[in-house]
Image: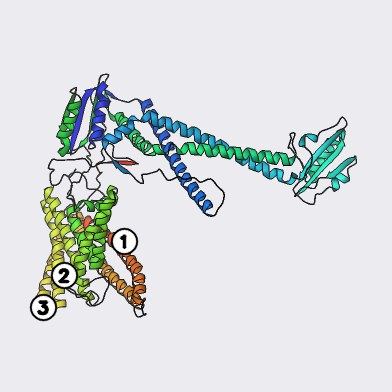
C-alpha cells in the first residue's frame, strides 16, 4: 500500500477527483496540516447533492410501490375475469427488472449520471402525482365518513334547505344514536314545542318547532337528552346528497386511477434512477472528502491510499488528464494508519470473510488466512464426514456460482461451502460416510464403531493447530527481534504437550514404561522452565516470580483449548448418527408394496436436506469458533481496517471487476 499526495491547480480539482474515483482503487484520507493553506469546502454544493439524492431516493421508492400496486391490480383483475365478473382487464407486468445490485460498466454509470436533469424532472413529476393521489385519498376518506353520517337520514323526505326558520319560530332537526331517545326533559319543559319523529333508519331523528325566544332553552334540553343538531345543509334531500357524494367518490377514484396509470409510465426510469442515486452518492463522497483537503487560493492538496500494484496505472491516468499536478508516492510512515488490502489466491480468498468477522489484520501484520484456511477446510469436512453431502455441497456451489451473479460476500460464502465440500467428500471416504447408509466400507475406520479413536484424532488435530499457532507467535516475535520471548513463551508449552503425548502413548498403545518416565521428566522440566521464564517481561523480581506462577495457571487455558476440539468428535458423530436414524425411518416405508421405495425416498430427501443444512450451519459456526478462540488468540492481534476505495459504497449497482493485466505480488498486506 502506498500513500499518494497530489498537488494541483484548484480549477482542476474536480477533474483529478473524477479520475481518482473512476480508478476504483483510491481511498482518500485527510491531508496532513501544512504550513500554507487551510481546510474548507463549499458546503452548499454538498447540501444540493444530498437534496438531489433524497429526491432520487423518493422516486425509486415510489416507483417500486407503484410497480407492486400495478402487479397486484393485474392479478386481482385477472382473478375477477376468471370468475366472470364484469371488469376491465389490466394487463400489467412488473417493469422493475433488477433485484439486488446489478453489474454495470463505469461507462454506463457515468452515462446514467449525465441524465441527471431528465431523471430529476421525472422525480418532480412523481412528487406531483404522489401529492395529488394523497389529496384524493384524503378527500375519499372525508366523503366516506360523510356517507356514514348520512346513513340514518335516508328516509328524511325534505331538503335540508327546507329546515329554516320563520319570522316567529325556529325549526330544529336533531339526531341521537340511541333508538330510544330520552325526550322526557323536553316534554317537561315549560315552553311549547312541536316534536315530529322522522323515523330514522337507525337511531332517532326528530324535527322540532319552537318559538324563537325558546330556541336556546330547547337546545339545552335536547343536548341533555342526548341529541345534537344535524349540520347538513344544501338544496338536496339526504338521498340526493348520498347519491351526489357517491358520484363524487367515483370521480375521485377515476382521477386516482388515471394518476396511477400516469405514474406507471415512469417505472421504465427505475433502473436509471438507481444509477443516478449511486452516482450522486459518489459525488457526495467526493464532496465530503474535500473537507479534508488543504487549499490555497489557487491550489489544492489531496492525499489517499493506493495499492502499489495500481500506482503507475493511476498516475498515468491522472497525467493523461492534466499536466498541472505534482504527484508524490511514498511508503506509509509510522504515524499513518493505512487500510488493509488482502490479495490471496482464489482458493484462499473466500476464507477472508471468516477472519473479517473477527477482525481484519492490521497493516504489516501477518495475514492469518492462508494458515487458517487449511485448518478450516480440514475441520469442516471432518465434522460432516459424508461423501454424499460433500458432493452435493460442491456441485450446488458450482451451479450457483455459474448461474447467478451474486454479491462479493454471498459468492465467497457459496465458494467456501463448495471448497469445504471437497474436504467433506475426503473425510466421508475415509470414514465410510455416504448419506448415512450402513455397510459402506471405510478407507480408514468407521467413527460410530470406533468412537475412542475418533475422539483421539479430534484432539490430535487440535494439538496440531494449537502448536502451529504457537509457531506463528514465535515467528511474529522473531520478526520484531524479540528472540527470547519467541523461544521461551512457546518452547515450554510445546514440551508440555510432548510430555503428555508420551504418557498417552504408553497408556493407549501399551508401549514400554520408559515413555511414561520420559513424559513425566519432560513435563517437570517444562514446568520449571515456565516458572523461571514466564515473567520475563516484568521489570521487578517480584513481578517475574508472580509471572512465573501465572504461566503455570495459563496451562489450564492450554488444556481447555485442546479439549475444545472435542467438538469435532461430537459433531462428526452427531451428523453420522442423525443420517443413520433418518435412513432407518425411511426404510420403514420400503417394505410397502409398489409405492414403498417411492414413499421412502420422498420422506428421506427432506430429512437429509435438514441434516445437511444443520451440518452446514454447525460446521461453519463451531469451526469459526475454533479459529477465533483456540487459534487466533495464540498469535493474532487484528484491529485492521479494510481498504475501502471511493465509489465502492453503492446501494443499487456494482461495477464490472477492474481488469488488471499486471502480475501482482503473491501477497500485499496493507
Circle 3 — which element? loop
Which residue is tagged 1?
617
Displayed quadrant of residue 521: bottom left
Circle 1 — which element? helix
Question: Can residue 628 be seen at all in this image of the molecule?
Answer: no
Where residue 128 appears, x then y in whole percent?
A: 50, 32
- Cα separation, mark 3 vs mark 2, equals 14 Å
The first of marks 3 and 2 along the sequence is: 2
User: With respect to residue 378, does 121 lie above or below?
Assistant: above
User: With respect to residue 145, does 582 lie above or below?
Assistant: below
Which residue is tagged 2?
500
The first of marks 1 and 3 along the sequence is: 3
Viewer-proximal residue among 348 and 331: 348
Please report the residue visible at 36 percent of the width from the left and 46 percent of the height from the top.
Answer: 99
Q: Residues within 10 Å of mark 1 (few under 14, many from 20)?
A: few
Which residue is tagged 3?
511
Which quadrant, please, contains the C terminus? top left
User: With respect to residue 386, does 282 lie above or below?
Assistant: above
Q: Residues within 10 Å of mark 2 (few under 14, many from 20)?
A: some
Viewer-proximal residue among 630 and 589: 589
Question: Can residue 639 be seen at all in this image of the molecule?
Answer: yes
Circle 2 — which element? helix
The first of marks 1 and 2 along the sequence is: 2
Label disc, if present, on residue 330 of the rendered structure: none
Q: Nearer the viewer, mark 1 or mark 2?
A: 1
Identify the residue at the far top of this view: 297
* Residue 77 falls left or right of residue 624: right
- Cα separation, mark 1 vs mark 2, equals 34 Å
**Number of marks in picture:** 3
Q: Nearer the viewer, mark 3 or mark 2?
A: 3
Please report the residue visible at 51 percent of the width from the left and 49 percent of the height from the top.
Answer: 77
Amino acid at each position: 500500500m502506498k500513500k499518494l499526495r497530489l498537488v494541483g491547480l484548484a480549477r482542476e480539482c474536480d477533474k483529478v477527483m473524477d479520475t481518482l474515483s473512476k480508478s476504483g482503487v483510491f481511498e482518500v484520507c485527510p491531508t496532513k496540516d501544512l504550513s500554507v493553506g487551510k481546510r474548507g469546502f463549499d458546503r452548499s454544493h454538498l447540501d444540493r447533492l444530498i437534496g438531489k439524492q433524497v429526491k432520487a431516493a423518493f422516486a425509486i421508492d415510489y416507483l417500486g410501490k407503484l410497480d407492486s400496486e400495478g402487479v397486484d391490480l393485474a392479478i386481482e383483475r385477472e382473478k375477477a375475469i376468471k370468475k366472470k365478473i364484469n371488469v376491465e382487464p389490466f394487463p400489467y407486468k412488473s417493469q422493475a427488472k433488477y433485484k439486488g445490485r446489478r453489474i454495470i460498466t463505469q461507462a454506463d454509470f457515468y452515462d446514467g449520471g449525465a441524465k441527471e436533469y431528465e431523471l430529476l424532472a421525472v422525480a418532480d413529476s412523481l412528487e406531483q402525482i404522489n401529492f395529488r393521489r394523497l389529496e384524493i385519498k384524503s378527500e375519499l376518506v372525508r366523503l366516506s365518513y360523510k356517507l356514514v353520517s348520512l346513513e340514518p337520514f335516508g328516509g328524511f323526505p325534505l331538503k335540508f334547505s327546507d329546515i329554516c326558520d320563520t319570522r316567529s319560530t325556529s325549526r330544529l332537526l336533531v339526531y341521537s344514536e340511541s333508538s330510544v331517545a330520552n325526550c322526557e326533559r323536553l316534554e317537561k319543559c315549560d315552553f311549547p314545542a312541536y316534536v315530529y319523529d322522522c323515523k330514522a333508519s337507525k337511531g332517532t331523528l326528530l324535527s322540532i318547532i319552537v318559538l324563537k325566544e325558546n330556541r336556546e332553552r330547547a337546545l339545552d334540553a335536547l343536548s341533555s337528552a342526548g341529541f345534537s343538531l344535524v349540520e347538513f345543509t344544501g338544496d338536496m334531500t339526504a338521498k340526493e346528497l348520498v347519491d351526489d357524494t357517491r358520484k363524487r367518490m367515483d370521480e375521485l377514484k377515476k382521477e386516482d386511477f388515471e394518476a396511477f396509470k400516469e405514474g406507471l409510465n415512469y417505472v421504465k426510469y427505475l433502473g436509471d434512477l438507481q444509477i443516478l442515486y449511486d452516482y450522486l452518492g459518489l459525488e457526495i463522497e467526493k464532496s465530503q472528502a474535500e473537507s479534508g483537503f488543504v487549499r490555497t487560493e489557487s491550489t489544492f492538496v489531496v492525499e489517499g491510499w493506493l495499492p502499489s500494484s495500481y500506482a503507475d496505472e493511476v498516475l498515468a491516468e491522472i497525467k493523461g488528464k492534466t499536466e498541472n499536478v505534482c504527484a508524490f508516492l511514498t511508503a506509509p510512515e509510522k504515524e499513518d494508519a493505512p487500510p488493509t488490502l488482502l490479495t490471496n489466491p482464489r482458493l484462499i480468498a473466500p476464507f477472508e470473510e471468516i477472519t473479517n468477522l473477527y477482525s481484519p489484520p492490521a497493516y504489516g501484520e501477518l495475514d492469518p488466512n492462508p494458515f487458517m484456511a487449511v485448518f478450516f477446510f480440514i475441520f469442516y469436512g471432518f465434522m460432516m464426514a459424508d461423501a454424499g453431502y460433500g458432493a452435493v455441497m460442491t456441485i450446488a456451489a458450482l451451479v450457483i456460482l455459474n448461474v447467478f451473479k451474486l454479491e462479493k460476500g454471498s459468492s465467497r460464502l457459496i465458494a467456501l461451502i463448495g471448497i469445504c465440500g471437497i474436504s467433506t467428500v475426503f473425510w466421508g471416504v475415509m470414514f465410510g460416510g455416504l448419506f448415512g447408509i450402513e455397510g459402506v466400507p471405510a478407507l480408514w475406520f468407521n467413527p460410530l464403531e470406533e468412537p475412542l479413536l475418533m475422539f483421539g484424532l479430534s484432539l490430535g488435530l487440535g494439538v496440531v493447530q494449537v502448536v502451529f499457532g504457537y509457531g506463528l507467535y514465535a515467528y511474529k516475535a522473531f520478526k520484531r527481534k524479540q528472540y527470547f520471548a519467541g523461544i521461551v513463551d512457546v518452547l515450554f508449552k510445546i514440551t508440555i504437550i510432548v510430555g503428555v503425548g508420551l504418557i498417552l502413548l504408553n497408556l493407549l498403545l501399551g508401549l514400554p514404561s520408559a515413555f511414561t518416565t520420559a513424559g513425566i521428566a519432560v513435563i517437570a522440566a517444562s514446568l520449571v522452565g515456565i516458572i523461571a521464564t514466564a515473567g520475563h517481561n516484568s521489570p521487578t523480581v517480584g513481578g517475574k516470580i508472580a509471572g512465573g506462577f501465572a504461566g503455570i495457571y495459563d496451562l489450564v487455558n492450554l488444556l481447555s483449548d485442546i479439549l475444545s476440539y472435542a467438538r469435532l468428535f461430537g459433531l462428526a458423530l452427531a451428523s453420522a448418527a442423525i443420517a443413520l436414524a433418518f435412513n432407518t425411518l425411511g426404510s420403514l416405508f420400503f417394505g410397502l408394496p409398489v409405492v414403498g421405495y417411492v414413499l421412502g425416498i420422498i420422506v428421506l430427501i427432506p430429512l437429509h436436506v435438514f441434516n445437511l443444512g444443520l451440518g452446514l450451519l454447525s460446521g461453519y459456526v463451531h469451526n469459526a469458533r475454533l479459529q477465533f478462540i483456540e487459534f487466533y488468540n495464540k498469535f493474532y492481534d487484528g484491529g485492521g481496517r479494510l481498504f475501502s476505495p471511493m465509489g465502492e459504497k453503492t446501494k443499487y449497482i456494482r461495477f464490472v471487476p477492474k481488469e488488471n493485466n499486471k502480475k501482482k505480488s503473491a501477497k500485499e498486506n496493507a
